[in-house]
Image (tube, rainbow, N blue to C red):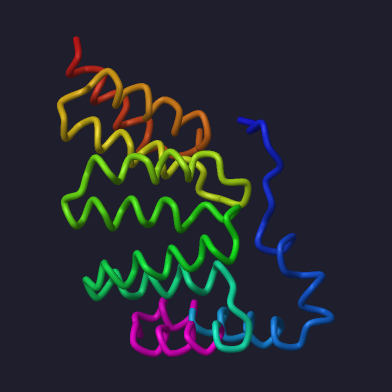
Amino acid sequence: MKENFFTESFEDKYEKEARINVDLSRALEFLSEAGECHKNGDIDRAIDLYKNSIAFCPTADAHTYLGWMYSAQDRFEEAIEECHLAIEVDPDFGNPYNDIGCYLMELKEIDEAAEWFEKAKTAPRYEPRHFPYMNIARIHLTHARYGQACGELYQALKRAPGEASLRTQLLELLSLLN
């Protein structure tokens, strides 16, 4: 599904500037290394590396992923703060909006989370475009609004047609309505 706005990738955002901005280039190196540490389960090292990245050149990506690491340690308030910093740096980056919504759900602030997922839906630079739809569907399910949850899952599936789990979730929910 083609969205009605320009979608900017990570490479589009940083590649050209990193060639001429040494601090940004170094920050992106730290960002990459932090991502590897995260994949390997070394959350503490990833946190240090994301902080190093931010020290060289603050990016929305580094703040968001630092927040993600904090959330892995159940430090949700700090995770939310990092996402707010990410939005200050780049309001077009969708991940921090969605992540704030997820962290609010963890804190049982479910209704407040919905507004953040709605913001994530329209962010120009956001790759897993189906995530906020899935998350709003979860909110609807907590309130037993099954029809609305189906609508959100359908929209998620339109944006990620290859996600078999979405199709299964939607079909299971539809079967409950019959």
Residue 156 position within the rendered picture, expressed as x and y whole percent measured from the top left: 44, 33
Question: Residue 56: which quarter of the image?
Answer: bottom right
Magenta region includes residue 11: no
Q: Position of residue 73 (x, y in %)?
A: 24, 76
On screen, residue 80 above or below 94: below
Residue 178 spot, x, y in % from top left: 19, 9
- Image quarter hosting the N terminus: top right
Question: Which residue is at the front of the view, 73 or 113?
Answer: 113
Q: Quadrant of residue 28?
A: bottom right
Q: Is residue 160 above or below residue 23?
A: above
Count of numbered circles on the image: 0
Between 114 and 48, the residue placed more toward the observer is 114
Image point (50%, 39%), residue name: 121
- Tell me where the magenta segment starts and ends, as one range: 35-53
In the image: residue 173, left or right of residue 62: left
Task: Give the residue displayed 49% in from the left and 77% down from the top.
Answer: 35
